[in-house]
Image: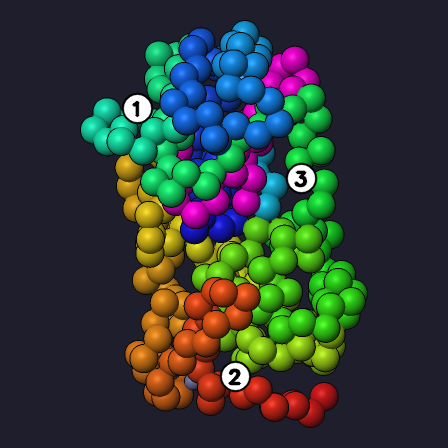
């Protein structure tokens, strides 16, 4: 599933191709992807205005249009945005023709991805928590937000209203790096643990953006290339393999229906470090 680093990569790689252009023709082959209006409205509404800016907010990609409206896309589990994809259009849900002659395909095998055309992007993304890479996201902000939730820290990190953009893989990686067991309660973490977690969330996400995201599943970059962030994973998707720190076996448990990988030695459930 594309998380913050994957969506950020898609945004960065699409900017040179779409910003300053306009849509000349839009084909929706699966009306299920359209939210809040009809496929006809989105087809008509997109023709004309220029794409002024591309923004990522959490896992949402926002095309800001010159008439003040916004096209918003969420790729969910298996969605991708492909430039001039000629070969495989089996899973094409929408096709956007651009004024520079290029085409953008919204492809999605599981058909869970969504798109909106709205007057105000805020109406779609207003419930999202802070951006973890924003300088206003401080350890104090994270501590305040976690302190309101008596739920496993892994579940809290997946809650887009607490912090935006973190998904299953990077939650596991950040918790391992911070040596925090995924089932520890969010509101019981010590201030020093939250500081370490905050630092590692940012480090893990930045490193993954540098590696253009993780192609463990179906994630593919707009021009068909893969990301390499998964080669740096310590625990995510590595159940049964030796922990790179202590050599013990990495275990898998399920938190909120999500496979969760951790090292029981490096991330003890009842560990309370002295501060
Ligand atoms: Zn370990």
Residue highlighted by disc 1: 84
Q: Is residue 189 left or right of residue 200?
A: right
Whether the residue carrying mark 1 lies under 8 Å from ligand 1 is answered with no
Q: Which residue is mark 3?
A: 125
Mark in front: 1 vs 3: 3
Q: Is residue 6 left or right of residue 158?
A: left
- Position of residue 197 relative to residue 202, above or below, is below
Mark sitting earlier along the chain (2/3): 3
| SS category of the residue bearing label 1 | loop
| Gap between marks 2 and 1 measured at Cα | 45 Å
Q: Is residue 227 magenta?
A: no
- The C terminus - image quarter: bottom right
In the picture shown, does residue 240 fall above or below 248?
above
Magenta segment range?
Answer: 59-81
Q: Give me the residue at 67% from left, 39% from top.
A: 125
What is the total number of numbered labels drawn onto the structure image?
3
Q: Earlier in the sequence, mark 1 or mark 3?
A: 1
Q: Which mark is residue 267?
A: 2
């Amino acid at each position: 599933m594309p998380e913050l680093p994957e969506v950020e990569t898609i945004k960065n790689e699409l900017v040179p191709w779409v910003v300053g252009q306009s849509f000349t023709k839009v084909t929706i082959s699966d009306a299920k992807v359209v939210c809040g209006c009809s496929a006809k409205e989105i087809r008509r509404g997109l023709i004309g205005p220029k794409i002024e800016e591309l923004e990522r907010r959490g896992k949402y990609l926002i095309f800001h249009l010159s008439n003040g409206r916004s096209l918003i896309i969420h790729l969910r589990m298996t969605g991708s945005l492909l430039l001039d994809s000629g070969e495989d259009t089996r899973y094409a849900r929408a096709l956007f023709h651009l004024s520079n002659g290029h085409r953008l395909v919204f492809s999605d095998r599981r058909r869970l991805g969504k798109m909106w055309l709205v007057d105000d992007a805020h109406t779609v993304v207003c419930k999202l928590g802070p951006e973890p890479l924003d300088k206003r996201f401080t350890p104090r902000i994270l501590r305040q937000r976690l302190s309101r939730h008596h739920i496993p820290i892994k579940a809290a990190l997946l809650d887009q209203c607490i912090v935006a953009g973190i998904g299953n893989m990077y939650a596991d990686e950040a918790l391992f790096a911070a040596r925090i067991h995924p089932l520890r309660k969010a509101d019981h973490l010590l201030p020093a643990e939250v500081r370490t977690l905050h630092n590692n969330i940012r480090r893990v996400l930045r490193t993954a953006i540098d590696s253009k995201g993780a192609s463990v599943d179906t994630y593919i970059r707009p021009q068909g290339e893969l990301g390499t962030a998964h080669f740096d994973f310590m625990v995510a998707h590595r159940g049964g393999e030796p922990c790179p720190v202590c050599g013990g076996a990495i275990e898998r448990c399920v938190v909120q229906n999500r496979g969760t990988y951790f090292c029981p030695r490096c991330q003890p459930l009842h560990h309370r470090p002295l501060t």
